[in-house]
Amino acid sequence: MSSITSRPYTNESDLPAMLDLLRRCRAAGQIITWPTMADLREICHPALVDWEKHLWLDADEKLIGLALMHQSGGLYFYAYPPFQNNGVESQILAWAIERCRALELAEVRCQAREEDEARITFLKSQSFTAQDSLTIHLARSLREPIPQPQLPLGFTLRHLAGEYEVEDYVALHREAFGTNYMTIEGRLAFMRGPNYIPELDLIATAPDGTFAAFCVCSLDREEDPPRGYTDPVGTRPAFRRQGLARALLLEGLQRLSRYEIATAHLSTGSWNTAMQHAAEAVGFRKVYEMVWYVKRMGASSG
């Protein structure tokens, strides 16, 4: 264990080794659903200051562990080789707990896919407890017929016209989700990233031009095979229950079908039954679930 060292993420020069670690973990059988390659690139953008990133290296300075922790306490971690007796995962959790306490957060949260027995066993051994809330992952074939979207009278579907609309978009996102996590700087970083495709960045506008709902579609060509996504989706409270989410999903599916990909993916919380119903109505079906495991900062850290 003494040969393992750790350090904070430095800059984007660390990114190639981080992407390589994800690939090695996948090849070793780890069930990795997030981050995707595109997500990791986005998180490492200098403008995204709400993520802490920490790296673990072996005696040869080769990257063997990676932790991504959001300022809200959400932790995503990977190590290679996975769950061995070298203590990397334990060091990662010890680091995350220390950071949560320094930030005065009440808990640290991790996800585990429902069949990922190794990760679940490890988290339980570290006094993490499963929560009732789940993240549900759904998929839909792009080879099947995609109906035309139907909108309420006077509403319009289009993609974001450019950076000059970012302030309105950020306000829409915050109101739709009831959080302040979306920032102008973070949104601009996403739009300036190498995987951003403007025509897939969809919004629905009300008759008076107000941004009513959005659906961020994307294409990750670094995945094998390439994958399409139709999330996140959000609607302002004043415009809910009018079919806007369903219309945006159908428009997104149609646009994604023009690319050489076979399947679209979407994730939502188990508590968000409205989103589940909208996704299922346009042909999405559940593929797997991610369980949230939580450790309170008042609990013993072992």
Image (cartoon, grey):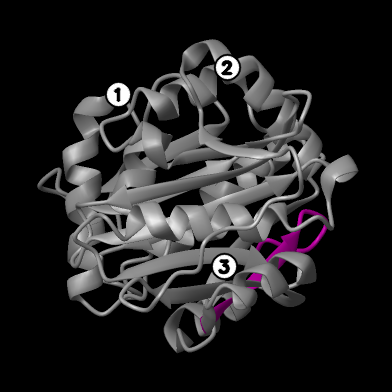
At numbered mark 2, what does the secondary structure look like: helix, strand or loop? helix
Q: Amino acid at mark 1?
A: Asn
The spot of residue 146 in percent (x, y) is 44, 70
Q: State which region is magenta.
A: 287-302
Image quadrant assignment for residue 210: top right
On the image, the x and y values in percent for residue 92 come to 46, 54
Near-viewer residue (133 or 112):
133
Q: Secondary structure at mark 1?
A: loop
Per the image, the residue denoted by label 3 is 111
Q: Is residue 294 above or below residue 256?
A: below
Question: Which class describes the residues within 10 Å of circle 3: few (<14), some (14-19), or many (20+)?
Answer: many
Q: What is the number of the mark on residue 11?
A: 1
Cα–Cα gap, marks 3 and 2: 34 Å
**Residue at horizontal 52 percent and vertical 61 percent from the top:** 148
Lower sequence index among marks 2 and 1: 1
Q: Is residue 267 above or below residue 285?
A: above
Where is residue 13, by image quadrant? top left
Instruction: Residue under label 2, please give it.
Output: 165
Q: Is residue 212 above or below residue 74?
A: above
